Amino acid sequence: MMVGSESHRTLQIYIPLVIYGLLLLFPFYWMTIVSLKPSSDLFDLNFNPFWVQRFTFENYTYLFENTEFWSWMWNTMVIAIVSTALSIFCSICIGYALARLRFPGSNFMGIGIFLVYLVPPTLLFIPMAQVIGTLNLFNTHWSLILTYPTQLIPFASWLLMGYFLTIPKEVEESALMDGCSRIQILIRIVLPLSVPGILSATIFCFTLCWNEFLYALIFMSSGDMKTIPVGTVSDLIKADTLFWGSLMASALLGSVPVAFIYSFFVKYYVSGLTASAVKG
Amino acid sequence: MNSGSIQSENFLDRESSLGVLLMLPGLILLAVFLAYPFFLGIWLSLTDTRIGMPGEFIGLWNYVDLLEDEIFHQTAWNTMIYALVTVPFKAVMGLGLALILNNQIRFSNPIRAFIMLPWIVPTALSSLGWFMIFDPVFSPISWLMIEMGFIDSNINFLGDQLIAVTAICWVNIWRGIPFFGISILAGLQAVPPELHEQAAIDGANKFNRFNHVTLPHIKGILMITSLLSVIWTFADFQLIYVLTKGGPANQTHIFGTYAYQVGLSGTEIGMGAAITLYMFPILAFFSIILLRYMRKTA
């Protein structure tokens, strides 16, 4: 097909790729070098700002010792894990019911769930703050654990329903004939066959929880209850410029977990994305 | 085929009862934390409620007042630019990225993982990186342009309305390129190679093959990705909250940040709810197009 010389390939593929790489990754490079500089160097315009002249970890030490960074990390982790587990459980149930069972309202539910997926937190946050207040959940993990699934369940159900539909019905029918119950079939046959789908739904949910900002900003006002994105943005931005390096350090470290998960599961993510786009 | 014909006395084995039971946990959550707040929001928007003060029913006055609010006009206009004008840029740059990644490349998996970073890391945190890059004092862009002799003094990226909106849109585009790229790539990989070979044999050049073979195949994904992108960015919040908080002088708000400022910071809950609900018909419009399109292609 593409019979080009090596230099031709370099020109057409690798040079544009490097340009894209610079464009897309520069902010992360910038955050890294700022986090490794003493603040004084940041303001000294005689230095080349694109390089670290004097290397220091003092910004990281400051972040770990003088802020509530580890509490934020812990909160984000707990909330993301529990909320993801809850969402995946609900989504497996909904996905299977929509894919395989006929019940009152089942046709309408499929579209309903999809439309709910398109209802953003921005539309609901003001009344949601009232609801959380009424339930007395401000500054608790539960405020986010219970509200995040409303953003996660619709997409995850949709994605899992697509996976369940690809499993041949005959497999389930013969098991039914053999006297297995529907629940047994779901647990022993359908779930093992849907591991890639469940994995991509899990990654999707976890990342969304980790990255969520608006609800966390509103529901968690006390410093030690914040999540990583909110804590970094609201508690580290002070008039005092000393915080720049620590701010970038926190932003970088807060991004690591999701970046790490994705680099391992990028294949599942891509397949999940296409499944949702093509099968939907 | 007809599994319902297997009669069983067990409640859990009857399709209709099991179906309803399986739907319940998710539906209860959605009812309490999605449907209820939605209707509560509609009610609040019809009252003059403030934080700590129960309000009274005032009909559509919040909506009417907003129509005369200059900042709200600017907000609506900004949201349109932010959600719509950025899409062609994301699509073209994403397509370029996808065409590159569709070749055999060494280390393609780590490269893809790195390229995805703008899309997957928390937007609030990557926006902080951009916030520093746009700093009025030590912006590296200003430094570079001064070194190269293009400008004499630092650019105040986020302090001037026009530059600030451009900067915000750029960060939005930057975040969206990988999403478009990876989605389009999935579409490209579904194009049967035989079609390209056949077209090449028939004498079609690269450009023609792209127009007549590749483009029709990725049209569907391009459309769906664009609509999703519009719906998501329309309802964005964190990117602008971090970069400008709607400033300078309330000139860069979008619906989400303006509703936050009026409804929560400014304690006018009823008015804030009305601002968010102005988004609803527009979101519904794009959602319905998306749904119809997806059903047609399915």
Image (cartoon, rainbow, N blue to C red):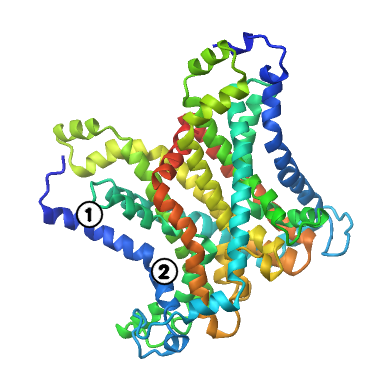
Left or right of residue B84: residue B43: right
- From the top left corner, tell me how far across and down residue A202 is, in percent: 53, 44
B89 and B14: which is toward the camera: B14
In the rendered structure, the residue with mark 2 lies on which chain? A
Amino acid type at image mark 1: Ile
Task: Choose top left, top right, bottom left or bottom right for residue B211.
Answer: top left
The residue that label 2 is drawn on is A27
Are the two marked residues, 1 and 2, in contact with CB atoms closer than 8 angstroms? no
Q: Residue at x 67, y 68 (%)?
A: A224
Q: Earlier in the sequence, mark 1 or mark 2?
A: 1
Asked whether residue A170 is in view, the answer is yes
Left or right of residue B54: residue B104: left
Q: Residue furthest left?
A: A5
Image height check: is B142 above or below B76?
below
Amino acid type at image mark 2: Pro
A65 and A29: which is toward the camera: A65
Q: Nearer the viewer, mark 1 or mark 2?
A: 2
- Res. A13 mark: 1
